[in-house]
Image (cartoon, helix red, strand yellow):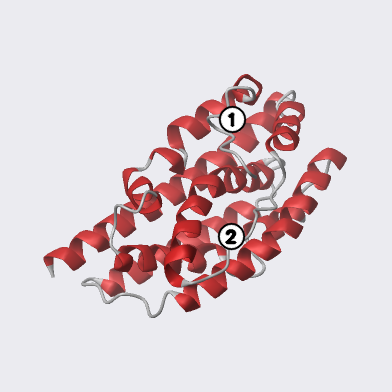
Amino acid sequence: MPVDIVQSASLAGAWGAMGTLAASDGSTTHPHLTALARGNASLRDLADAVHHVARLHGRHPGLIDFARRHAVRPLEQGWIEAAADAFVAERTRLVRLAAAAGPLPRTPGHAESEAAAAAQRHAMDMLAQSDRTGCATGAAIALAIDWVPIRAMLDLAAAHFGVASARPELPIPAETVTVVDVLARESALERAMLFGAQQVFAQHRALWDLLEARAGARQRG
């Protein structure tokens, strides 16, 4: 996904409720992620972020892999299949980047952070395996949307930690907009899709809150 699909002027009108939700609840506006992606954070903070994103999205099967089992409409299935295939490379690079970043930075309150991270992983898995039609797809779409600002941070980390750059391969904005537009024509499906997306955005923002708190604890410690 080569451009920021939330802020793309040519596509913004097509997103409807999903675009509004992404703009208000997505990761792109979180101050800690913004600081990380712009290089306004320490290398320890950057390494910490890489490790935690890897814990959340570096496993297989992951959110999109689970969600593909719940897609029922051909257009929905096609998008998720493409996203799952593309995320294989993203996951491989993420694991490689976590290794290059070195050990997880020592941080006061580590046990509490571990518990919070485990709860986030569990919540993501439950969303992606929801039997409510549209929920898992909404969760997968939210991950694709949020991956744009997350990928910007990971690209900066890769430059610092000596990992080769790579072009993202997630479905292009126009394809994702089409899926959202078609599915949103059924009100019950749209509600479920928005619920799944909202919950993923909430988990991501909780992650940046956690990482921000961990960075503060290291500074104080």
**Badge 1 element:** helix
Can the viewer see residue 202 in this picture?
Answer: yes
Question: Which residue sits at x=42%, y=74%?
Answer: 101
Q: Nearer the viewer, mark 2 or mark 1?
A: 1
Side (left or right) of 14 relative to 19: right
Residue 27 pos. (x, y %): 45, 43
| Residue extending furthest toward the top | 13
- Hey, what amino acid is under mark 2? Asp
The disc label shown at residue 18, or none: 1
Q: Which mark is residue 125?
A: 2
Dot label at residue 59: none
Up the image or down, 27 lies above or below 125; here it is above
User: What amino acid is found at the position of numbered circle 1 in the picture?
Assistant: Met
| Callout 2 secondary element | helix
Classify 10 Å Cα crowding around label 1: few (below 14), some (14-19), many (20 and above).
many
Q: Examine the rendered structure and indicate whether residue 125 appears above or below residue 96.
A: above
The residue that appears at 61% across and 46% down in the rendered structure is 144
Q: Earlier in the sequence, mark 2 or mark 1?
A: 1
Q: What x and y, as percent, mark residue 132?
A: 68, 44
Q: Where is residue 218 shown, x and y percent of the image? A: 20, 67
Is any part of residue 70 visible from this angle? no
Distance, label 2 to label 1, CA atoms, is 21 Å
Percent coordinates x, y for residue 64 in the rendering = 67, 55
